[in-house]
């Protein structure tokens, strides 16, 4: 007596189970953890308004006057100085170009 196979719910095949289906839909993994979400909320609600009021919405590198595409930069890195992660005096605006140069160690203040 032949055994009736259940169709795979992913692709409709009767030759494998859905667990082993090569067309199985993969669940997206969240790439941002709780600390990242906490920092993003701090950056958007506290840091950016503070920097706008204190220094204006402009790149803080000397001679640069860009106002578009600004990133919030830590003067002392978050990795080496975790205690300064939420310190407002450690933050500044840098345009995308200067921020990437600073992060790569090719730019000093």
Image (cartoon, rainbow, N blue to C red):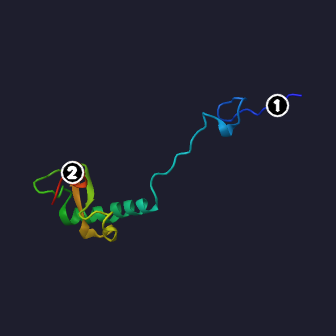
Q: Residue 42, how many percent across, how many down?
A: 36, 64
Q: Indicate which disc, 1 or 2, sits on the residue closer to the N terminus.
A: 1
Q: In this image, 66 relative to 71: left or right?
A: left
Name the image quarter holding the N terminus.
Answer: top right
Q: Quadrant of residue 87?
A: bottom left
Q: Return the residue at label 2.
A: 101
Q: Residue at x 33, y 71 (%)?
A: 83
Q: Residue furthest left?
A: 63
Q: Quadrant of residue 5?
A: top right
Rendered image quadrant of residue 74 = bottom left
Secondary structure, mark 1, is loop
Label 1, label 2: how many angstroms apart (C-alpha)? 64 Å
* Image point (38%, 59%), residue name: 40
Q: Quadrant of the C terminus?
A: bottom left
Res 40 label: none
Residue 3, position as x, y percentages in the image? 84, 31
- Residue visible at 68% across and 37% down? 18
- The disc label shown at residue 4, or none: 1
Residue 12's place in the image compared with 32, above or below, is above
Q: How many marks?
A: 2
């Amino acid at each position: 007596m032949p055994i009736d196979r259940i169709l795979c719910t992913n692709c409709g095949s009767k030759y494998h189970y859905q667990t082993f289906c090569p067309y199985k839909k993969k669940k997206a993994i969240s790439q941002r953890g709780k600390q990242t979400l906490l920092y993003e909320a701090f950056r958007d609600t506290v840091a950016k308004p503070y920097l706008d009021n204190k220094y204006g919405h402009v790149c803080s590198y000397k001679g640069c006057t860009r106002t578009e595409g600004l990133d919030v930069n830590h003067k002392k890195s978050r990795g080496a100085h975790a205690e300064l992660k939420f310190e407002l005096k450690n933050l500044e605006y840098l345009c995308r170009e200067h921020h990437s140069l600073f992060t790569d160690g090719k730019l000093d203040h």
